[in-house]
Image (cartoon, rainbow, N blue to C red):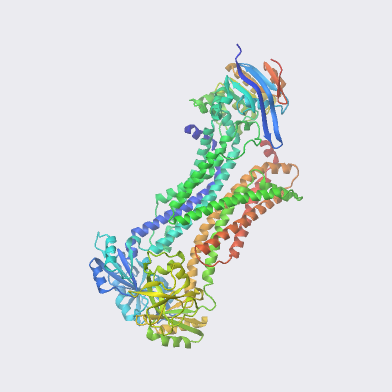
Amino acid sequence: MIDPIVRLSDITLSLRSAAGLVNILRGVSLEVNRGQHMAVVGPSGSGKSSLLAITAGLERPSSGRVEIAGQDLAALNEDTLAQFRGRYVGIVFQSFHLVPTMTAQENVALPLELAGEGGALERAAEALATVGLGARIGHLPTELSGGEQQRVALARALIARPPLLLADEPTGNLDGATGEGIVEMMFGAAEEAGATLVLVTHNDELAQRCARTVVMEDGNLRDGTS
Amino acid sequence: MTGLAWTLARRDLRGGWKSFRLALVGLALGVATIAGVGSFGAGLVEGLRENGRVILGGDMALQTTMIELTGEQQAWLNERGAVSRTRDLNAMVTGTDNPALLVSLRAVDEVWPLYGAAELDPPIALDEGLTANGALVDRGFLERMGLEIGDSFMMGEGTFRITAEILNEPDRASAPFQLGPRVIISEEALEATGLAGPGSLVRHLTRLRLVQGEAVGPVIADLREAFVDAGWRIRNHEDANPQLRRFLERLRMFITLVGLAALLIGGIGIASAVSTYLDKKTGTVAILKSLGASSRLIFTTYLLEVAAMAGLGVAAGVIAGGILPLLVGEVVRSALPVPVDVGLYPAPLLLAAAYGLLTAVVFALLPLARTRDIPPAALFRERTGESSGRSRLSDRILVAVLAAALAGLAVAASDDHVLAAVFIAGAALALLLFRLAAVAIMAGARLAGRPRWLSLRMALAGLYRPGAATPAVTVAFGIGLTVLTAVAGVQANLRHEIGQALPQDAPAFFFIDIQPDQIDPFRLLAQETTGVHDVQSVPSLRGRITAINGVPVNEAVITPDVRWVVEGDRGATYSALPPEGSEITQGAWWPPDYAGPPLISLDEEVTAGFGVTIGDTLTVNLLGREITAKIANLRQIDWTTMGINFVLVYSPGMLEAAPHTHIATVYADREAETPLRTAVAQQFPNVSAIGVRDVLSDVLAILGRIDAAIGGIAALALVAGVVVLAESVAAAQRRRLYDAVIMKVLGATRGLLARVFTLEHLILGLSTSVLALSAGTAAAWAIVRFVLYTSWTMPWLPILAIGAVALTVSLTAGLVASWRALSPPAAPVLRSE
């Protein structure tokens, strides 16, 4: 029996702006199975990142139901949702979003520290070593290159071994060679951990590496390859 | 969770404290003022308490004016311990090449002082210095008379030789107030001068040193019971100089309140700095939330950060406030007439720290609470206005409770609860007023439309754009300016009141202690002196009001503006005709040949303050005798003429027989003053001349010193305001750095941008200044009219000066901060955005 880790049912998202109400998602339904690698593609402004934010529980939908690993996210308050996310979801952002005042090691250790797990800093050092940054653990984000920052972000997303890994344009701010290195690392790590990977990208090559591709267009979802 | 929050806070604060630098300076300033003044005040209280016996010269002291203690009273005191007597009076010193000098003369007995010791230079024994017409004098006397140790001078009918300079007179602080430098002679020598004749204004002080271990309270109670109508003033070593203590307590409270105003302004700086800091941390908060951090953890983390920063500011303020009295203690101590136990006093330091921390929490809590509402989705997009920006009701209630605790602490710790409460209500009103003003300025700028002149259009937009400095600058700078204007307005009015107190037709001299047989030759001498225009004289007695309409004064209801009338001896006279310069407003003057029971004519304002009217009675202790007289009429007295005027004027027929002297005013040209003073001193050595010009210049000099101290403290509030102004403007400029860079990319010159910033700060500074100067002037007017009960003169000069300084400061702060937005190259800014 198929057990989807992500189940979105008839999701809409409307946000108020100065110009009026903007409908970003218009009734999206989607299921992603455990261990599946899926790409979300589509033009800019089509709602890809919003879909990812809703899947991660970073944003509440205007209507519809979000279930991650069988948990209805609407049933969780903001704090229990944050704790749930810490355990089940790892996120890699286009802009890295590292805490600027924390070193690479402290950034990576954060998810474990927030979950109250011991040995966070030691495990973070190990994780950084696996992404090739063993010598840079004491550096602040401003002292790292874009590629290095994204590797730190990747290590941070994976350190708590979440079953769901979400990535929003992970190579969008990187040059080709650096981006490829990150992609290799991300797919390798997801494979090794048996994690589900949902990837938002403009990059066709990257999308093709995924077993499944869905296309977002003007707030609606169209299934591509499965 | 707190452990993790502390770990996160510690990491997050790396370099972050710099954002708080200016706000911390504002907080530290307020805390340092309160801690410093509190510490020094505690030292003063401790000094007064520990040295009460020395300051008073005994365990207790009795003061009478013009009457000596009876044999029975003396015997009563002698049975209870050692007794010492001194007499204080004014006298004229002559017999030298210099003009006659009015001195404050004290005659002491052989056991004086009962506590402490007089320090003399050369260090001779006291009895050695006082034998054989020896006189001890202070430095002021030697300087003004140009005399040295060993020189001689005349006083009354006696000739004296200066034997030593007084370096320290232990009980000077509790001595009756007299004009002129100090001269101390022996009791026997005073008798020989003839200055203490019948009716002369002599204050007798009798001190008692009790047998070791005996409590002073019961002795005073016994004394009051034994001599009910004695008419003396009793003082206790536990409160040796209540007037001075009250004055210093008032001063301490005033400075503390100004410190609180500075703290309030510092608090606004904290709120502004916390908002700016958290704005920059929106991304970090969103990241932490996306990684699983709860809102509570985020709130605790940033609360710990702000608490650590505030703790730093408060600690700096407490350390500065604790050390300051130790550093300046010696200087201030020498300027005060009482000993100060300079040291570290934990209680005032803790109180100042509590004020500082509470202020920081009250002002930081609302911006902090908003971190809970930052959505993790902020990582994906700028917020689209879905948050109302309003704080939660529970947060607002918590802030209100903490603010009430802060206000309650300030009121409870103040010596005058009502005044402190009024001040705090005023501060809250000012806060609200300036907040509304900020809203009005922003709305006005928005409503001004879109003028064609680009610089003005951009300047107006800068006033109301999100994150504009307008609210913080208007409130903080406005309150600082208001405090300074209010203080300057009050000071200017006091100076004006005293400066104008010398009208064109004011007398040149008051001559006191003229014996009845001297009055006619005195008048003749004065009238024959060239340059003298007029001489007026009246009989003069001293008395103390003891009951109003039969009710003892300490039980009577008396309004504060006339309380001074019952707080000491008052001059009294008798007259067959209404005194010149007075207008009878109610009732009728008695017939010139009136010979019935005693009647009294009373000042109209005093009558109103006492709550009495014609037909009621007033009981006055005149030379030890209680005399009750019926109020026959009311007069309106114009005190500003400085002519002879008495609150109490009796009908003739009763006081003529009592020992009394005459008092005279002489109106003369300035050139005639020295010859007249010299001639009177030679012919009437017992008569003291009080130069009106000298007194006023002394009073103005004292006021000038107090002025400078209070003005300096009030300026602190403005400094705190300027600090917040600079901080807020800098924060706003950081926010618009990106705009300025885009403008430059599109071709805007730095000149255009500088014009925009200048205009913006000119409009902001001008509107804030106008409002603050108006509010400060209104506060000064209220204080002058309803607290000081004097007339109001618009203090244009200080107002305009403060306005000019305010505009300059505002423009400068704006331009300096703007320079940061004008200077950097565009590329790095665009890249970081």
Q: Tell me the residue at 27%/68% (across/down).
A: B83
Q: Position of residue B426 (x, y in %)?
A: 53, 54
Where's residue B32, x and y in %?
48, 51
The image quarter containing residue B328 is: bottom left
Q: Is residue B499 above or below residue A95?
A: below
- Outermost residue, front side: B615
Residue B238 visible in this rendered orientation of the protein: yes
Q: Nearer the viewer, residue B681 or B226?
A: B226
Q: Quadrant of the C terminus of chain B?
A: top right
- Front-most of residues B606 and B78: B606
Q: How many marks?
A: 0
Image side of residue B681 versus residue A121, left or right: left
Residue B312 can be seen in this image? no
Residue at the far right: name it. B452
Is B386 left or right of B533, judged from the image as shown? right
Nearest the viewer among B448 and B363 is B448
Q: Where is residue B223 drawn, in percent x and y?
A: 27, 66
Q: Residue furthest top?
A: A1
